[in-house]
Amino acid sequence: MIVSVLYPNHEGAKFDTDYYKATHAELAKEIWNPERVELIEGQAPGGGAAPFAMIAHFHFSSPEAMATAFAHPRNGELHADVANCTDIAPTVSIGKAL
């Protein structure tokens, strides 16, 4: 199972990539304990604004492992920390690799 957290970019958006990588993603790893994490910093071919500031993929071994992560009592702390790196409301997508 993969939990993808997408931060859609928009004019005037604030996103601190360094904080996200060094602190927020590490907190997510600590709380959720995923098998693997991929962070994709948005880039726009040919210049201009990237469509997404960041896309984070959190890989879990099973639906049960993902459910355990989502039920963790520290999830409030993780959600509250988002404000330390961005003012973008993330979109969350859940799926599986084919």
Image (cartoon, grey):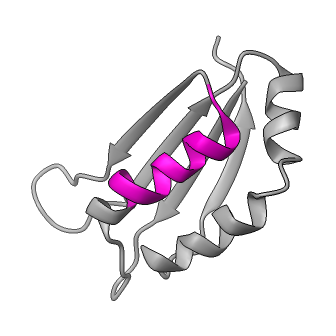
Please tell me which residue lies in front, 30 or 64: 30
Q: Position of residue 13 (x, y in %)?
A: 38, 82
Q: Residue at x 88, y 35 (%)?
A: 67
Q: Position of residue 35 (x, y in %)?
A: 59, 21
Q: Residue at x 35, y 73 (%)?
A: 15
Please tell me which residue lies in front, 22 or 42: 22
Is 25 one of the magenta-colored residues?
yes
Q: Is residue 21 above or below residue 68?
A: below
Is 19 one of the magenta-colored residues?
no
Q: Point out the residue furthest to the top here.
A: 98
Asked if residue 86 shows in the view, the reply is no
Q: Point out the residue furthest to the left here.
A: 46
Q: Main secondary structure of the magenta part?
A: helix
Q: Residue at x 47, y 50 (%)?
A: 25
Label tally: 0
Q: Position of residue 81 (x, y in %)?
A: 57, 71
The stretch in magenta equals: 20-34
Q: What is the quadrant of the C terminus in the image?
A: top right
Asked if residue 88 shows in the view, the reply is yes
Q: What is the quadrant of the N terminus in the image?
A: top right
Q: Point out the residue furthest to the bottom here.
A: 12
Q: Quadrant of residue 89?
A: bottom right
Q: Position of residue 84 (x, y in %)?
A: 46, 78
Q: Is residue 80 above or below residue 62?
A: below
Q: Residue at x 89, y 47 (%)?
A: 71
Q: Is residue 11 above or below residue 58?
A: below
Q: Is residue 24 left or right of residue 12?
A: right
